[in-house]
Image (cartoon, rainbow, N blue to C red):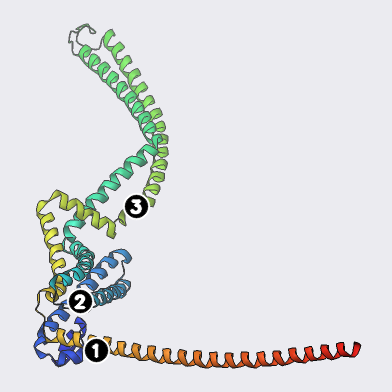
């Protein structure tokens, strides 16, 4: 239990030695540390799921998910540990506002992949609808890209209509032949029962129509078979093009596609939009909870000890600075005194030497002048 408490102390960024001197603050920093820790865990899970949708592999998703969770944990720990309780509340809030903004941004980043996981079934349904739409659009575009198929199908329909027309003509001749044999009076029959001259003529016409129909049917069937073979070739080419596009359509399952599907679902359903908002607010509350705990909690013994420790460091720094400054000034003064003394002594010796030399030269000149005189 003690190790778990110290672990949560570490997560809160508290100083162990100071916190042990303020035991009444232990529970507060255990709660803050636990919040920071579980926020990092949620961030790791969210990032792992998001990256799994990208890599479609477990190990890279686990590795980068843990890395992301550790980064979020470190940021949260830094945000909480860098806050100081001041006696002026407004000063605390001014320092906390940038941290709150960062915490809200982190909450939005963490919540989005988990939202995608929570609404996974609805998102999968929307993605399937999108895939069907892509497939339909792809087929329409491919059909436009192969107009030869429609032209060949039109020719086949024309050939079949010719056969149908011939069949209708043969059937009409058959009806007239039957009416002539059975004595039915029409505009094209005599009304006499039996196989008379008119009936034989009708029979000849029927035989001729039947032969013409069979000849047309055979001839058009050969042409239809040829056209259908050409259509099959174009269809195989179109299918090959569709199969090239199929992996891209089937792979329409990435993170951006899921986020777009979630956006469409929230626009279509007010209930999902409300649930989406509440999930984001929940993660924002979790992410900002340690900061608000630090802000609303009263100034405790740990804060007093921490401020005392920091003030001692500042005083020690000031003492070291004053001492170093004094030593530096003493060294500079000593240097200046010794340097200027040596300079003055050197100048005096030089002046005496120059004066003696000058006097010697004057004496020498005077002696030369006397000798000449």
Q: Nearer the viewer, residue 87 or 54?
A: 87
The residue at 12%/75% (across/down) is 293
| Residue 188 sits in quarter | top left
| Among the two numbered marks 3 and 1 on one chain, the one whose residue lies closer to the N terminus | 3
Q: Are marks 2 and 1 in contact (CB under 8 Å)?
A: no
| Residue 124 sits in quarter | bottom left
| Among the two numbered marks 2 and 3 on one chain, the one whose residue lies closer to the N terminus | 2
Q: Which residue is mark 1?
A: 312
The residue at 10%/51% (across/down) is 270
- Residue mark closest to the camera, 2 vs 1: 1
Report helix, strand or loop for mark 3: helix
Which dot marks residue 246?
3
Characterize the local packing of mark 1: few (<14), some (14-19) or many (20 or more) Cα atoms within 10 angstroms: few
- Residue mark closest to the camera, 3 vs 1: 1
Quadrant housing the N terminus:
bottom left
Q: Are marks 3 and 1 in contact (CB under 8 Å)?
A: no
Q: Nearer the viewer, residue 117 or 7?
A: 7
| Among the two numbered marks 2 and 1 on one chain, the one whose residue lies closer to the N terminus | 2
Q: Which residue is mark 2?
A: 83
Q: CA distance from mark 3 to mark 1?
A: 70 Å
Most extreme residue toward the front, as rendered? 373
Q: Nearer the viewer, residue 276 or 173?
A: 276
Report helix, strand or loop for mark 2: loop
Q: Nearer the viewer, residue 79 or 357?
A: 357
């Amino acid at each position: 239990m003690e190790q778990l408490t110290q672990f949560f102390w570490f997560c809160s960024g508290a100083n162990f030695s100071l916190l042990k001197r303020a035991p009444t603050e232990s529970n507060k920093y255990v709660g803050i540390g636990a919040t920071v820790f579980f926020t990092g865990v949620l961030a790791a899970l969210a990032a792992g799921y998001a990256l799994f949708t990208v890599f479609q592999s477990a190990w890279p998703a686990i590795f980068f998910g843990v890395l992301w969770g550790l980064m979020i944990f470190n940021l949260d720990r830094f945000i909480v540990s860098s806050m100081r309780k001041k006696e002026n509340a407004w000063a605390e809030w001014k320092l906390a506002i940038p941290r709150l903004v960062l915490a809200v941004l982190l909450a939005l980043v963490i919540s989005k992949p988990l939202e995608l996981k929570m609404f996974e079934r609805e998102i999968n349904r929307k993605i399937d609808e999108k895939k069907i739409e892509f497939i339909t659009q792809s087929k329409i575009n491919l059909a436009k890209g192969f107009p030869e198929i429609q032209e060949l199908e039109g020719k086949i329909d024309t050939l079949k209509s010719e056969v149908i027309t011939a069949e209708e003509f043969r059937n009409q001749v058959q009806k007239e032949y039957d009416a002539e044999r059975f004595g039915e009076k029409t505009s094209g029959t005599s009304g006499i029962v039996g196989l008379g001259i008119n009936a034989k003529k009708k029979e000849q016409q029927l035989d001729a129509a039947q032969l013409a129909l069979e000849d047309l049917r055979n001839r058009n069937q050969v042409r239809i078979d040829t056209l259908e073979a050409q259509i099959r070739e174009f269809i195989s080419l179109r299918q090959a093009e569709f199969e090239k596009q199929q992996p891209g359509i089937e792979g329409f399952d990435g993170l951006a596609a899921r986020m777009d599907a979630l956006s469409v679902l929230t626009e279509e359903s007010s209930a999902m939009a409300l649930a989406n908002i509440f999930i984001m607010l929940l993660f924002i509350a979790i992410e900002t909870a340690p900061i608000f705990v630090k802000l609303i909690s009263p100034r405790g013994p740990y804060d007093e000890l921490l401020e005392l420790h920091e003030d001692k460091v500042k005083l020690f720094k000031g003492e070291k600075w004053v001492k170093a400054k004094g030593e530096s000034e003493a060294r500079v003064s000593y240097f200046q005194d010794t340097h200027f003394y040596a300079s003055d002594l050197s100048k005096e010796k030089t002046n005496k030497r120059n004066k003696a030399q000058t006097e010697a030269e004057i004496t020498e000149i005077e002696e030369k002048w006397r000798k000449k005189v």
